[in-house]
Image (cartoon, grey):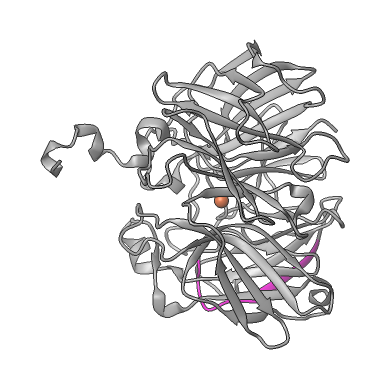
Amino acid sequence: MTALDEPREAKVPFHLRGSYAPVTEEVEAFDLPVIGSLPDGLNGTYLRNGPNPMSGRSPHWFAGDGMLHGLRVRDGKAEWYRNRWVRTRTLEGARRRDPNTGEADLTVGVANTHVVRHAGRIFALEEGSLPNEVSPELDTLGPCDFDGALRTPFTAHPHVCPETGEMHFFGYELIHAPFVTYHVLDREGRLVHTQPIRVGGPTMVHDFAISRHYAIFLDLPVVFDLERAMTGSMAFGWQPEYGARIGLLHRDRAREGAEPQWFDVSLCYVFHIMNAWDDGPDGRYVWLDGGRHETMWAKGNDKFEPSLMHRWRFDLQTGEVKEEVLDDIDHAFPRIDDRRCGLTNRYGWAVAPVDPADRRHDAATGVVKYDLQTGARTTHSFGDTSLSGEPVFVPAHAEAGEDEGYLVTYAHDVATDVSSFVVLDASDMSAAPLAVVPLPQRVPRGFHGSWFADE
Ligand SMILES: [Fe+2]
């Protein structure tokens, strides 16, 4: 097929058509039909965020206004589904940057990337601005700066230490050093630590990691370019000369002024980390598993190189790094049982094509499960025409084992154009879904979500 033969729709960027196309309505529905049965004890709300430009147009997949899709489950019933735009200041016409001074207004963002809960508050996140607090019913309460304490953007990928209950996060900025700032919220949601992290320049930092004793920072060669930004195109590009390194900061010693120990790694980009762990406060090694891209946006900002699960082992004594490819499938959105965050995990789950050779954006996708102990990879397929969202693990009960529980997500069948809330048995990828809840409208392919168990 030549370019001349392509259907007209192909001229529309991928992020605005097909399963990615924004929806135009906010709807709600109550007491939805359930195919199969919702497990006993699965009581809570699944919220998922993603870009859904209100105007119908956006220059890049990452730029659309955030929309939350929520499904409430209690006592075996699907009580409601609801979708709502996050009512950001951007939707009111506010601008991120003063066009004259270049000064950033951190209350202005699109809130489109993730949604998390900490200390009883729910935040819609996007890495360029402050969190937008929302209610459990998806109403927007407004930007949150933690009583004036937070003076940087807030990443879309904070991580909660299961042992201390702290939420560790960072913010990155584009114009002024230190570019990256590390922060900790205590379990009550108070900002208790803020520390500049010296990186090489205005690098795009999407995720980071914690292990029991370290906070782990990526300093990789996707870098902000002011000249590109002035042209109105995506402001980040691949700059291999920038180099690639990863920094380990001892969490306790950071509170006493310690700085990260930096390790050079092979050139790459990483959007999403799966997990990290270490072997003690004065131990020798730290391990990091995540999706490694050989390059990113080297041939245009709509061209995403494959993401392969990769392991880095950092030797704190010698400064050496050992790298290892763990798996060869191109995956997205890796998740674990969050109770293992920073600790060794045996299992992880991610979105990946059902046919590993299929590289199309609209390829049927499934959920893969990595068993890091055996090296096995198993796949759940929703069928030849269905697309899976990020699989979020929900433990079956408080004492449940690591894969003893459920994966929840939204799937979209492109043949029928029906989206569904789906519950899988996390221990068995070959099993049919435990429950499928067809939704009253399509949920566009989006980014990240969380399960908020009833407290
Ligand atoms: Fe992300």
For the point 54% across and 73% down, the residue is: 176
Viewport quadrant of the N terminus = top left
In the image, 124: left or right of 60? right
Compared to residue 4, the image places residue 325 above or below, namely below
Q: Is residue 198 magenta?
A: yes
- Camera-nearest residue between 222 and 373: 373
In the image, 26: left or right of 427? left
Q: Residue furthest bottom?
A: 318
Compared to residue 239, the image places residue 76 above or below, namely above
Compared to residue 415, the image places residue 66 above or below, namely below
Compared to residue 75, the image places residue 134 above or below, namely below
For the point 41% across and 25% down, the residue is: 414
Task: Tell me which segment is drawn in magenta.
Answer: 192-203
Q: Position of residue 345 (x, y in %)?
A: 73, 55
- Camera-nearest residue between 346 and 299: 346
- Answer with the quarter of the image where residue 15 lies: top left
In the image, 175: left or right of 166? left
Q: Position of residue 145 (x, y in %)?
A: 71, 52
**Can residue 279 be seen at all in this image of the molecule?**
yes
Q: Position of residue 5 (x, y in %)?
A: 13, 37
Viewport quadrant of the C terminus = top right
For the point 75% across and 60% down, the residue is: 342
**Can residue 108 be seen at all in this image of the molecule?**
no
Q: Position of residue 95 (x, y in %)?
A: 48, 49
